[in-house]
């Protein structure tokens, strides 16, 4: 009887479940699983199933992709207007060099417009005179230098014939013949390069004019231009950018002035050394050393090698060795004494960063990119350091404000 009663209750329960299932199905709901179905654990959240390191890598990865795409588009735009960009960058460097003079003349009582005009005219006149002097010296000494080069080549040929390297006359003649054939085979390329040189000269003149006008406006109206640029920055980031701008300009000014002083010292002492050694065109070579000093590391090597080669082909091996000693001595003094003392802590860039930035700038934009690379890295380092300190200070202020709210009035 008990068993029959249990079966009756089970039948009633199953009938009730069947009735509920039919009612749920009729209502459009999914029926509940039967009581004998195995239990299935709930699946975890997909985000929680991904390891934390992989999530961080994915977050950083897509941001890096967006940043790389932005940089690529920016570089394409810059390459399309490369002449304008280089002219403006040159104007910034010249302005950083001349702006202290404008400020000094303004403090003496001259109107800003007159101080700007006097400074700009003197600066451009000095640059033009330097360029004219170099060209004049080269044109005046080109015949003498050509004769000395021919004599030096003849002396080198005789030295090779009598040297322990066992070089024969026929080998030297074969090398000379190969050089003549290479020049003859590439005559069309040389002609096309000369035609392209006309275009380069026109672009250079256009860039010089753009740089001159940009320098005038930056010297005269630099603060107003900076305030207008700040309006383009979002309001939330404007205070930090406004504080980073003057510090970046201070770094750029210190870099340009320090580089000019170091380059001038290099040019004077190396020029005097090769002058007393009797190397021809010592003054134009000194000017080339001054100009190449604006390309860190690479410029000093190239200009020093040029002076040594001229000494070798014109005065012989002994004079070339002495010129090499002079160049190395001045460059060692520059690297270990002048640059740390003159530039100081205003430009804190690691030598590895200097080498990599010069190489990258040269690969991207040639000589102009190599010149601009180091000041760009120095300014970027200053801006990033200031913005990091500024954000940390703002976070501390917000934390103090939350921990110690101002008292409320009754």
Image: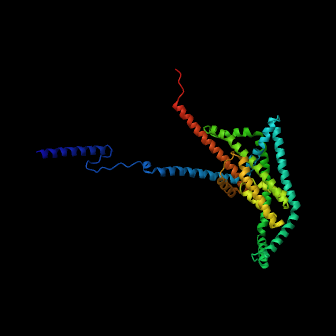
Image spot of residue 144 (x, y percent): 88, 64
Q: Answer with the quarter of the image where residue 328 lies.
A: bottom right
Let me know if residue 139 appears in the view: yes
Q: Is residue 4 left or right of residue 25?
A: left
Q: Is residue 248 above or below residue 200?
A: above
Image spot of residue 409 (x, y percent): 53, 22
Q: Is residue 49 above or below residue 405?
A: below
Q: Quadrant of the N terminus?
A: top left
Q: Is residue 346 left or right of residue 128?
A: left
Q: Nearer the viewer, residue 355 or 406?
A: 355
* Residue sitting at the far left: 1
Q: Nearer the viewer, residue 32 or 131?
A: 131
Residue located at (59% from left, 37% from top): 393
Colour mapping: rainbow
Q: Is residue 189 above or below residue 373?
A: below
Q: Is residue 281 left or right of residue 367?
A: right
Q: Nearer the viewer, residue 370 or 263?
A: 263
């Amino acid at each position: 009887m008990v068993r029959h009663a249990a079966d009756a209750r089970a039948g009633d329960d199953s009938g009730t479940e069947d009735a509920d299932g039919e009612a749920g199905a009729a209502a459009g709901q999914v029926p509940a699983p039967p009581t004998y179905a195995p239990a299935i654990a709930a699946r975890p959240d997909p985000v929680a199933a991904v390891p934390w390191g992989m999530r961080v890598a994915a977050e950083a990865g897509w941001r890096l992709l967006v940043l790389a795409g932005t940089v690529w588009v920016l570089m394409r735009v810059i390459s399309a207007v490369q002449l304008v960009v280089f002219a403006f960058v040159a104007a910034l460097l010249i302005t950083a060099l001349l702006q202290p003079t404008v400020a000094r003349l303004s403090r003496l009582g001259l109107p800003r417009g007159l101080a700007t005009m006097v400074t700009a005219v003197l600066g451009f006149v000095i640059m033009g005179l330097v360029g004219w002097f170099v060209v004049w010296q080269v044109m005046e000494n080109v015949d003498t230098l050509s004769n000395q080069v021919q004599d030096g080549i003849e002396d080198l040929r005789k030295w090779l014939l009598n040297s322990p390297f066992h070089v024969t006359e026929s080998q030297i003649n074969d090398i000379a013949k190969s050089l003549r054939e290479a020049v003859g085979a590439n005559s069309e390329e040389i002609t096309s390069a000369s035609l392209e040189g006309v275009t380069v000269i026109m672009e250079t003149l256009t860039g010089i004019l753009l740089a001159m006008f940009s320098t005038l406006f930056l010297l005269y109206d630099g603060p107003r231009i900076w305030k207008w640029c700040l309006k383009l920055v979002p309001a939330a980031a404007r205070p930090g950018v406004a504080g980073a701008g003057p510090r970046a300009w201070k770094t750029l000014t210190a870099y340009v002035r320090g580089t000019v002083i170091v380059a001038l010292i290099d040019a004077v002492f190396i020029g005097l050394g090769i002058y007393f050694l009797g190397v021809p065109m010592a003054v134009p070579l000194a000017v080339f050393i001054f100009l190449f000093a604006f390309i860190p590391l690479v410029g000093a090597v190239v200009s020093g090698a040029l002076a040594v080669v001229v000494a070798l082909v014109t005065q012989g091996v002994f004079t070339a060795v002495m010129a090499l000693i002079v160049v190395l001595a001045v460059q060692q003094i520059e690297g270990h004494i002048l640059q740390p003392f003159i530039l100081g802590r205003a430009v804190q860039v690691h030598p590895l960063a200097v080498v990599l930035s010069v190489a990258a700038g040269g690969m991207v934009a040639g000589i102009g990119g190599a010149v601009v690379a180091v000041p760009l890295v120095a300014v970027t380092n200053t801006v990033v350091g200031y913005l990091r300190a500024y954000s940390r200070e703002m976070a501390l202020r917000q934390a103090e404000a939350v921990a110690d709210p101002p008292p409320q009035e009754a």
